[in-house]
Image (cartoon, rainbow, N blue to C red):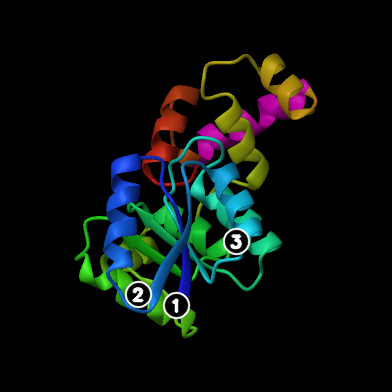
Amino acid sequence: MIRVMLAEDQGMVRGALATLLGLEDDLEVVAEAAGGAEAVLAAQRERPDVALLDIEMPGGDGLSAAAGIRAAVPSCRIMILTTFGRPGHLRRAMEAGASAFLVKDGPAGELAAAIRRVVAGERVIDPNLAATALSAGPNPLSPRERDVLTAGADGSTASDVAGRLHLPEGTVRDDLSAAITKVGARDRVEAVQTARARGWL
């Protein structure tokens, strides 16, 4: 029996996935979570074979949860199932140790098959997204530039961001300027919008 954990913030979608997977003779949903931090705790508690994670969730996104689960339960395979098939998300998911990246509008019957393939040691990636990711190129932002841009997305001043991230204010200004330039934006707001649209944040 393959033990599966689901992390999805929309209760109706999570319930539908649990029902769908429960119809399979060799799959058992052993835990459900509505947020990233909750998913890591559930994985530590239940030690599933597979964690099926949405990307955009409260309390830590699926990509952060993926890294946390991989650290806490190394034997658990990570699968990302998302509405947002962005090339940058795919790259970040692979960096976080994900074995699969699928979009939610795929055929329902393929999900159970993908879980079995991942448990068997295969990597499963939506083919259209894989092609797009290859053509899009790598994320131009450094980890710190991503952190600074994310922290400043709400319009916080450089001073506020510096305090939040425990960085010198000059460093924050330099990183914001570099991020805006690398993304090809006119200002911070446009840089955040562009980076999010491409899955770089």
The kind of residue on which mark 1 rests is Val
Question: Badges 2 and 1: C-beta atoms under 8 Å apart?
Answer: yes
The kind of residue on which mark 2 rests is Ala
- 3D distance between C-alphas at marks 2 and 3: 21 Å
Mark 3 burial class by Cα count in 10 Å: few <14, some 14-19, many 20+? some
Q: Where in the figure is residue 18, as x and y percent of width and height?
A: 34, 57
**Residue at the location (71% across, 15% down)?**
159
- 3D distance between C-alphas at marks 3 and 1: 19 Å
Front-most of residues 40 and 63: 40
Q: Is residue 173 magenta?
A: yes
Sequence-earlier tag: 3 or 1: 3
Q: Where in the figure is residue 71, as x and y percent of width and height?
A: 69, 61
Mark 1 burial class by Cα count in 10 Å: few <14, some 14-19, many 20+? many
Q: Which residue is mark 1?
A: 118
**Residue at the location (60% across, 43% down)?**
37
Asked which secondary structure carries label 3, the reply is helix
Say the numbered circle drawn on residue 46. Answer: 3
Q: Which residue is mark 2?
A: 114
**Residue at the location (31% across, 77% down)?**
113
Which segment did they paint magenta? 169-182
Does 17 sit above or below residue 116? Answer: above
Mark 2 burial class by Cα count in 10 Å: few <14, some 14-19, many 20+? many
Question: Badges 3 and 1: C-beta atoms under 8 Å apart?
Answer: no
Front-most of residues 95 and 29: 29
Sequence-earlier tag: 2 or 3: 3
Front-most of residues 187 and 62: 62
- Magenta region's main secondary structure? helix
The kind of residue on which mark 3 rests is Glu
